[in-house]
Each structure stands twice: as structure tokens, then as C-alpha cells.
Image: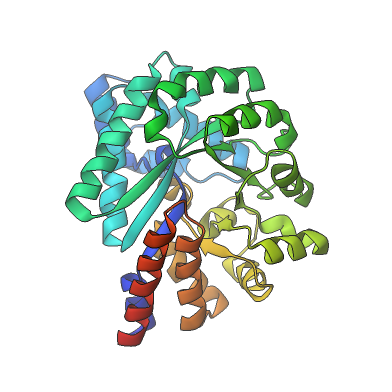
Amino acid sequence: MTDEDFISGLPKAELHLHIEGSLEPELLFELAERNRVALPYANVEAVRAAYDFSNLQSFLDIYYAGASVLQTEQDFYDLTWAYLERAQQDNIRHTEIFFDPQIHTDRGLAFEVVIRGIQQALADAEQHYGLTSGLILCFLRHLSEEEAFATLQAALPFRKWIVGIGLDSSEVGNPPEKFERVFAKAASKGFRKVAHAGEEGPADYIWGALDVLGVERIDHGVQCLQDPELVRLLAAKQIPLTVCPLSNTKLCVFERMEDHNLKQLLDAGLRVMINSDDPAYFGGYLNANFLAVWQALKLSRAELLQLAKNSFLSSFLSEYAKLKHLHEIEQYARQA
């Protein structure tokens, strides 16, 4: 078995995936036609050309513009189902999906329209593929905490469908501390907590997410190496980092994949795993990210196995389910 085939067949979980970021140009055009939304692009190729951005903010600008085509429950179902089909092809056994309801409610859509479409697709994927999932509501950090509170309130009737809350969008200038009260309120309602920190922002933002917000998992976190004390804490407590390699190079966090610090994070004993972030925009889904780092960083099969194990260990699955998936990985390794 080649290493490429080994990666392709490896059982995995994905814990850092923005469902709006899986909107491929073809589906964008299909939904625009369905909903009679005028797009500033002549064709699919023009959209792909527009995806050539240089930083987080220029990406977010087109990201929000693309979301305008999502208008009905069926649209959100189709978006989610398209990702789940790709996930199944990549041998993803479990996925924890971010969604950004404020992008849609600010356009006048009801929270219920968004979540019902996503949830139905997740339920169908479990039935058809045995692919389990969790849904994480993300607050947009460039908006106010008051707006986050309103979003949390809107989410409460659908609590059974939402495993946790997160924090995303423009990181620099919007530290985690800005959302201390709403995270505390969400925790009191039983939501698990994660937050984007240390992607483009400094290591201090990771401290803030841990100490002030009380998160269980850091999304991105690659800037932690700025702070040796932080690295020691992350290693000692095995606090997960959901690293997104193709995203990091597309947004110029690292100039080239060969410069990525994933291997350093692994060597430091940190619980890191690979994810695709916004795959329609960043050049690939989960297996593409695995292949890119394997090739650039010369990862061994043992390191690839550790990354896959970490993905399940870092999930919000039950301990029994985690053990079941770890056993599947060990069986796979013996047969490969």
C-alpha cells in the first residue's frame, strides 16, 4: 500500500470545518439561480479567480458575499449534504461542524431555517453512512457581545441539536475576553466551548480563550510556539489544537507548507490534528490536507496515525465511541 493510499483509507474525524466554507462555486451558482440572486461573477471560473485572496479579511469579504445565495432550509440541506458526501469519501467517521448563524440572521433569515436544513442532512448522513456528527454554533467576533447573546437566545429552543459554541471571524483586534459573559452563559446551559485563537492573532489570545472563556479546545493555535510556557501547559493538559494546514498557507500564516509548524507541535507532545477549515476556499478537503503535510513535512506513518487518533481523542464523542474508533485505527495500521 502506498502512503497516499494509506492516508486515503485512514479512519479520521474532522473537528474544524465551517459549513459555509464548503460552498463550492458550482453549488453557489446553482443556488443563485434557484433563488434568483444576482452574482457579480460571470461563471464558475470567475468565482474561483475571486478565491485568490491574501489574508483573513479579504477571504471573509468573499465568504460573506457567497453566503447570500443560502436562503431556504433546502439550501442549507444541500450545502451540508455536499460536504458530508465528500467526508464519507475521505473516510471521515465523525465530524463536528461549525455554522455561523449571524451571517444568515443578519440577512433576515430565521435561525430555524438555517439549523433545520443542516441538522436534517447530519441525521441523514448518520443513517446512510454511519457518519456521526456534532454541530457547533460560532459567534462572529467582529460583532458585539450583545449580538452574540441574542444569537445564543435564538439557539436555546434547538439546544438538543447543538453540542457546543465557538468563536470565529476576524481575530486580530477582537480578543476572546470580549465574549467572556456570553461564554459563561452558554456554559451554564450545558454547551461545550471552543474558540479560534492563535491563527493570525498572538499567543495571548490562546491564554485568553483558555483562562477567560474556559474553552476545551483551541481552533488553529499555531502561534502557541511564541510562548514556551503556553506550550508546556497545552502539552501537560493535552488541550487539543485543530490545525488547518492548507488554510494556513492560503492565508499566508505560513509562506509555504514546508514552513508549517505542525511537526514541531507534534514533537512538542501537543494534541494536534488536521482539518480542512473552509475547503472550498482553501484548496482541499481533509485528505488533501493530510497529503499536503505528509509530502511537505515528510511525516511518517506513525505520525499520520497519531494525527488520526488525536482527531477522535479531541472530539466530543463519548469515551466508548472514542475507544471504538481508536481500535479501528489500530486494526487499520496492522493491515496496512
Q: Quadrant of residue 321?
A: bottom left
Looking at the figure, which quarter contains the N terminus? bottom left
At horizontal 79% and vertical 47% (from top left) the residue drawn is: 204
Q: On screen, 144 above or below 28?
A: above
Q: Position of residue 307 (x, y in %)?
A: 50, 69
Image quadrant where residue 259 sits: bottom right
Camera-side residue of 271 and 248: 271
Above-or-below relation of 165 to 157: below
Q: In this rendering, would 174 be left or right of 109?
A: right
Rendered location of residue 308, percent (x, y): 45, 68
From the viewer's side, name the closer residue of 264 and 178. Answer: 178
Whether residue 141 is visible, yes or no, is: no
Question: What x and y, as percent, mark residue 216?
Answer: 60, 49
- Residue at figure coordinates x 77%, y 59% from the top left: 230
The residue drawn where x is 39% and y is 64% is 12
Q: What residue appears at the point 63 percent right and 23 percent down from the top-left corner?
A: 143
Figure label count: 0
Name above or below for residue 133 compared with residue 120.
below
Q: Is residue 279 left or right of residue 1?
A: right
For the rendered model, the colour scheme is: rainbow
Is the C terminus in the top left, top right, bottom left or bottom right quadrant? bottom left
Furthest-left residue in this view: 128
Q: Position of residue 176 (x, y in %)?
A: 70, 37
User: From the viewer's perspective, is residue 144 above or below residue 76?
Assistant: above
Q: Nearer the viewer, residue 149 or 253?
A: 149
Q: Does 87 sit left or right of 188 as displayed? A: left
Q: Residue 273, can we see it?
A: yes
* Position of residue 246 in the picture relative to residue 31 (left or right): right
- Give the farthest residue toward the top: 108
